[in-house]
Amino acid sequence: MSKIIDKLNIFKQCGKYDLPLWQCPQFLFLVMGVLIIASAILSYLIGTQYIEAPLTVALIVLALTVVLFIISYIIIKSFEKLAEAVRMKSRFIDITSHQLRSPLSNLQWITEMLESERMGDLEEDQMDYFRMAKENVTRMEKLVSDLVTVSRIQDEDLNFKPEAFSLEEVTRKVLADFKFFTSAEDVEIEIDVESDLPEVKTDPNQIKMVIENLLDNAIRYTDGGGRVRINISKKNDKVQFEIEDNGIGIPEDDQEYIFRKFFRSKNASKHQVRGTGLSLYIAKMIIEQSGGEIWFESEPGEGSTFWFTLPIN
Amino acid sequence: MATILLVEDERNLQRTLSDLLEDEGHEVVSAMNGKEGLVEAKEEQPDLILLDLILPKLHGFKVLKKLKNTEKTKDIPVIILTNLEGTDDVQKALEMGVTTYLVKSDYELSEVLNKVEETLN
């Protein structure tokens, strides 16, 4: 009995989905039911005016109503499934972010410990293997954190902490972090910054991620001996960041899709196995949430240039 | 040399962090759950406490509250070392008087060590 009452309690049923009332399947079903009954009564009233046998009209309307109810019930069932899928997805993300992240960060610290030779000296070959292990852990961590960021963007739950900061400083920090990678890929990086640049206002950690993603792409899709140029300057009431590479470029057919989630250009997949098609989507979402714009120009075989702007503090 | 209390329920991390800190010349006292952490804090009077938040027996926030409400332990600096990265958690911890809040996956071991030394000095 209490089960049936629970089923009838719309608010309790809707609470399960974390959705607003107007999106909740049970509530929609109720609204639909009321609408159907209203239209049945209305059509009965109209029907009686035109046909001499009101009982027939009533039966027809009743039959129609039953059919409508069945159809709407099926629709609602599928809605319910969708809502359930959304709920499962956010739970999945939750599990990924915590259950997968914590062993990964343990692993990172463990390999770091070994590599630091605190646990005993290492032969050169052993050291190489620990470095390889660490590199792979870092890669996996980046992937997991990208997925978590994407789901946060979808849930509009991006941890945005705006503050005033120097875009140049953040950029130089990223460049320092990438030093090893740039020299391994034999890419030369130039940076040019306008003097007396004003500070920008948004979340520096998120912007750091955007610059990392753009720089990573610029380096990754450049064949040996590549060149990357970064330019930061003031444009009206914004600060503009420009990054130019002489890499493989983006095919014209793919250009309109590159900011789409999980999109990877064909030549990119051919050139590099790595990549999830998430970094530019994340970059666009973060820049737009910061009140800026992001765009690019690209010539296949010649290279690409990406720009983004951020509002001045 | 300092005495550091490490309240962490994950065996792997407990070992890794202990080895690291001992290698730096510190004495490490280990606690595998919140209750134990509280007892050790009172008994050992460490110079610093590294505290995880998701802990069996007593949640990290409760441990923190009791530490700050006890005369003997209220001045011991606390570094939170956790995987919880919600803004609310960070805010709450800072309001409760922790010195530093570190999200594990965002920090390399060497950076954690830097924060420890910074706090001890």
Image (cartoon, coloured by chain):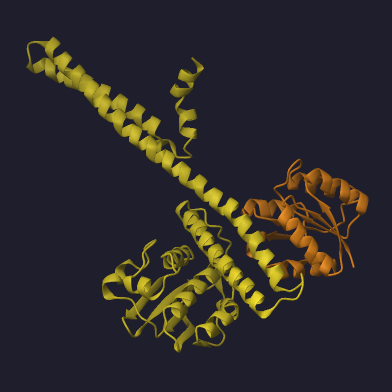
Chain colours: A yellow, B orange
Query: Can residue A136 be seen?
Result: yes
Which residue is at 38% across, 33% downward? A25
Q: Does residue B105 sit above or below A249 in this rendering? A: above
Say which of A154 and A145 sits in front.
A145
The answer to which image quadrant residue B99 occupies is bottom right
Q: In this view, does A95 lie to the left or right of A26?
A: right
Q: Compared with residue A67, is residue A112 higher up or lower down, i.e. above or below?
A: below
Residue A236 visible in the shown view: no
Residue at the image position 66 percent from the left and 51 percent from the top: B89
Please state which of residues B120 and A98 is positioned toward the viewer in this rendering.
Answer: A98
| Of the pair B70 and A239, the residue shown nearer to us | B70
Report the quarter where the C terminus of chain A lies.
bottom right
Q: In this view, does A126 lie to the left or right of A252?
A: right
* In-image side of B91 versus A169 (left or right): right
Q: Position of residue B2 (x, y in %)?
A: 89, 64
Identify which residue is drawn at 76% across, 68% down: B113
Could you tell me residue A96's position as x and y percent? Answer: 54, 52
Residue at screen point 59% across, 52% down: A98
Q: Is residue A3 left or right of residue A100?
A: left
Q: How many labels does the image show?
A: 0
Coordinates of residue A159 in the picture (x, y in percent): 56, 57
Question: x%, y% of residue A20?
Answer: 44, 39
